[in-house]
Amino acid sequence: MPTLRLIEVSKRFGRVKALDGVTFEVKDGEYLCVLGPTGSGKTTLLRLVAGILKPDEGEISFNGKPVNEVAAEDRNAVYVPQSYALFPHMSVVENVMYGPLARGVPRNTARDTAMRLLRMVRLDKRADALPKELSGGMQQRVALARGLASGADLLLLDEPLGALDARLRIELRWELRSRVKGSGATVIHVTHDQEEAMSVGDRVLALRGGKVQQHGTPYHVYASPGNIFAANFIGGSNFLEGVVAQRNREGSTIRLRKGLEIAVSDPSHELDESVIVAIREEKTSVQPPSPQSRLPSLPGEVSEVRFLGSFVRCEVTLDNGDRVVTKIPIGRPGHQLTRGERVSVVYDPRNTLVYEHPPLGLRRELEAY
């Protein structure tokens, strides 16, 4: 697959601008996950690359050659939609064999390929069933197997694991990535599941309201989110509003509501500037109040404790009224906290992020659209 490039691509549907000046590149053999909330433009993006839609503005190119006017069937790209789009009169195995047979692969070879892929998606025992005899999740797995069997250089997967139960979704995401990387195909995989995107993608592109918010490796987009929306959507964060009270070369002190202060390692903002401090939920811990703590802390009271399997979600109401959530792995000290208990939320200033205060306010910046 040649390098795929989008340059300032926009698409409107009436008054709605589904994509707005989108620019990015996908290299040969790369697995790109496009992450975003419902309505962010993810499916429109896939349909434009597939050739099902044409952009209103901008250019889509394969290996430097524009393909805006190239028909979908001539792009060597396979689009696997959320609606599955299986042939109702064909059996499961015949649906998967369709692509190889269309390329001239001998029937026995096509069937062998189809059965291997059906085993991968746990449907080899339903090979002779018709699509109407399968559940929605099963039909989605057939559509995924059919896309993989196509042999196309570019796979465009629209929520390919979205209809599956949690355990199967986790199992198949690894097998899907392994098979695709082994084939050498290039993939754009759309999802709203942050964990899925971070675990299978070579790179992650975050969309919001048709605009690119972040593009980079999973570690980069997690560790260095470019804005408040990305920090919130790609991994849960706590957000605290304040004003820069002190600064030096090592960092700053931010004064929160009611005089509570938090130390940060970012010295780049001006004195008296309004800012937002972000701290990842898993980068905080909760301890009994102690003046001997080596790390800075914020005093408060436990307001909610929820058991969520491998960890406990603890919400602390700080003494100034702000709320902070921390995730405590089961077995770690502090996981048996009780509501109303006095605690200190401990953090490392190096794990804080500081952003300019958004003109429309924090709440608006955290919204999906």
Image: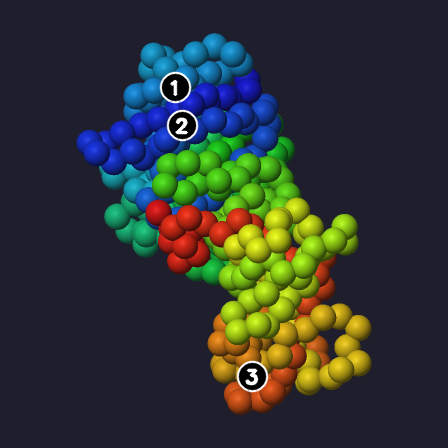
Q: Which residue is drawn at the image coordinates 59% and 37% (left, top)?
A: 216
Front-most of 155 and 359? 359
Distance Cα–Cα, label 3 vs label 1? 53 Å
The amino acid on which the numbered mark 3 sits, given as a three-letter code, is Glu
Mark yes or no: residue 342 visible: yes
Q: Is residue 298 positioned above or below 31 on the image?
A: below
The residue under label 1 is 58
Q: Nearer the viewer, mark 3 or mark 1?
A: 3
Left or right relative to 361: residue 175: right
Which amino acid, mark 1?
Gly
Image quadrant where residue 283 sits: bottom right
Secondary structure, mark 1, is strand
Earlier sequence position, callout 2 versus callout 1: 2
Up-down relation of residue 292 to residue 42 (above or below): below
Q: Could you tell me residue 118's position as x and y percent?
A: 47, 43
* Residue located beneath label 2 in the image: 21
Q: In this view, does 306 lie to the left or right of 218?
A: left
Q: What element carries label 3?
A: strand
Give the residue displayed 59% in from the left and 30% down from the top.
Answer: 30
